[in-house]
Image (spheres, rainbow, N blue to C red):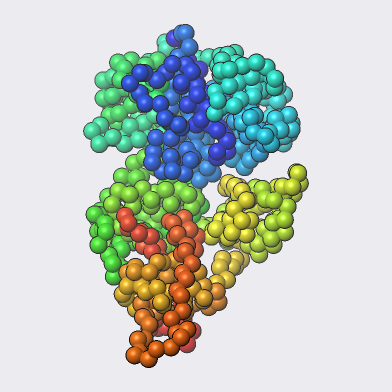
Amino acid sequence: MDFRNIAIIAHVDHGKTTLVDALLKQTGTFSEREEITERVMDSNDLEKERGITIYAKNAAVKIDNTKINIVDTPGHADFGSEVERVLRMVDSVLLLVDAYEGPMPQTKFVLRKSLELGLKPIVVINKIDKPSARPDVVLDMVFDLFVELGATDEQLDFKHIYTNARDGIAMREIGDKSDNLQPLLEMIIEVVPQAPSETDKPLRMQPVNLAYDKFVGRMATGRIYEGTLKQGQKVSVHKLDGTIETHKVTKLLTSVGLQKEEVQEAYAGDIVMIAGIPTINVGETVSENENTEPLPAINIDPPTLTMHFLVNNSPFAGQEGKFVTSRQIRERLERELETNVGLEVTFPENSDTFQVSGRGEMHLSVLIESMRREGYELQVSQPQAIIREVNGVKEEPYENVTIDVPDEFAGTVIEQLGTRKGEMQNMTNNTGSTRLEYIIPTRGLLGYRTKFTTSTKGEGTLSHIFSHYGPHKGEIERRKTGSLISGVTGKTLAFSLNNLQQRGILFIDPAQNVYEGQVIGMSNKDTMTVNPTKGKNLTNMRSSGADEAINLVTPVDMTLERALEYIEDDEYVEVTPENIRIRKQLLTENARKRGGVIKS
């Protein structure tokens, strides 16, 4: 059997997972017992809800004597390090581009990595059924991007194909008659080089992703570059620090469709999952003996954002969560480090505070949301960009930002990004829409997405990806408004909230329990302490017009992402299985005055 290893790379929501679904269905990979759902590769609950791929996953289809290993990769910038690692174990990529939007930041980032590794992509222009589709223009944009990224002449001579993944149709040229994806499968077999089958050489395999199973422990997914690997075989693991460990492979799995099938032996060129090596890590080399030359190590990009995870000590602590102690939070974070290689956690001794660093707001919020759903209760601080010092000069992370907005909102967005120290790189207009390209400090983007959505009335799209470390830009103002802070503990009343909503935007409903120091809304002006539990004074005097109708505006649904964007450095987000609350670090007004937070 010969192997073709291919990754699908694209920007968020350009149709990667939908295309994989269609390939699996049309090649008869699903058994009769398997339920065929939409976006089957997005198996995680968070992936289904958000409509994005978070974890890289493998599938495989067989055509005659050829096995095509397909890797569906994350499309969000915060999970870009996974994409880089996956590219090491494939021989080509399907570069999927929306027929209207064209290349986006993640497309550019991953394409650059692919070209640097010498891969020759197949360009797939998807969603050609859109009324606004402009496939020929997008194809020219992709070619220009190849040139900009320094592609070789051979790479510039790329093959392209047009698809409608939702309906499972592919065609080599617009207008060709087709009712399936056969043209795409034929192109993959024509263009993607056959994986070298050097089974006569000593074993060399390199993990690019990790998983954890409660029965067999840590598992590693990677490609066998040379030799054969057998279940029960003793192997040498070449660690990144140069040491060598000896272990035994207890389980060997390979992909069949979406399922993992246990096999006794796997061969060079195939992508497999192994268990039995508890200390295995990404980028290490699994070999037959100690004398084998290790494969080049894979470097993991350093985190750019950091925040603190704390034990919940609010007045409502312990009422909703199953896991609330520092020991339980510590064990959960240690377990996360088993598989989440882009994450860094500092565990101080005798402290209830853990410093957690990741690749971005999405990366960290996915971890917090997963813990919340598992029954954990904790508090988290405001995300902060990681500032480093090089030769005595402070440097901070910068992001490439691409924004598409209707023309009438372009001026507002330009003004907002200017105050956040953004520098415009390019601006183009296309039939009522403006595309803005910026380089901006990561700090400037923190807390901006909600404001952007409001300013563009939900019609704008904002995409960003880490660019580089550059000079520190100085102070950046995040929020001009203050907070409405509850000065009492009790149950909120509609009468009081009706008066408070004139002072700002509320985050809570009537008849909801609040505590002193909880942030219950955003003030139009300065931060103020209020009483949301105050009722109407009753008298025995009757008066016409005394009973005004209470008309409450629907409060803002404070999701985890919104809360992390909103909070200041003197606030925490309290995360429980049932609620997301914002609170001041110092709960009482007197404590805040003593701490210098309030100027008397």
Q: Give x and y (percent) for residue 404.
A: 66, 48
Identity of the residue furthest to the bottom in this view: 541
Q: Quadrant of residue 409?
A: bottom right
Residue 389 in which image quadrant: bottom right
Q: Residue at left 64%, top 22%?
A: 161
Q: Position of residue 421 (x, y in %)?
A: 65, 61
Which residue sits at x=43%, y=88%?
A: 543
Q: Closest to the observer: 509 or 588?
A: 509
Q: Position of residue 322 (x, y in %)?
A: 24, 54
Compared with residue 121, is residue 495 higher up or lower down, i.e. above or below? below
Instruction: Please state the total of marks drawn on the protein image.
Output: 0
Does residue 88 sit above or below 328 in this rendering?
above
Above-or-below relation of 64 to 121: above
Seen in the image, is 522 located left or right of residue 36? right
> Is residue 148 visible in the rendered structure shown here?
yes
- The residue drawn where x is 44% and y is 9% is 1
Residue at position x 50%, y 57% from top?
386
Residue 272: x, y in percent?
A: 38, 23
173 vs 359, nearest the viewer: 173
Q: Is residue 445 visible?
A: no
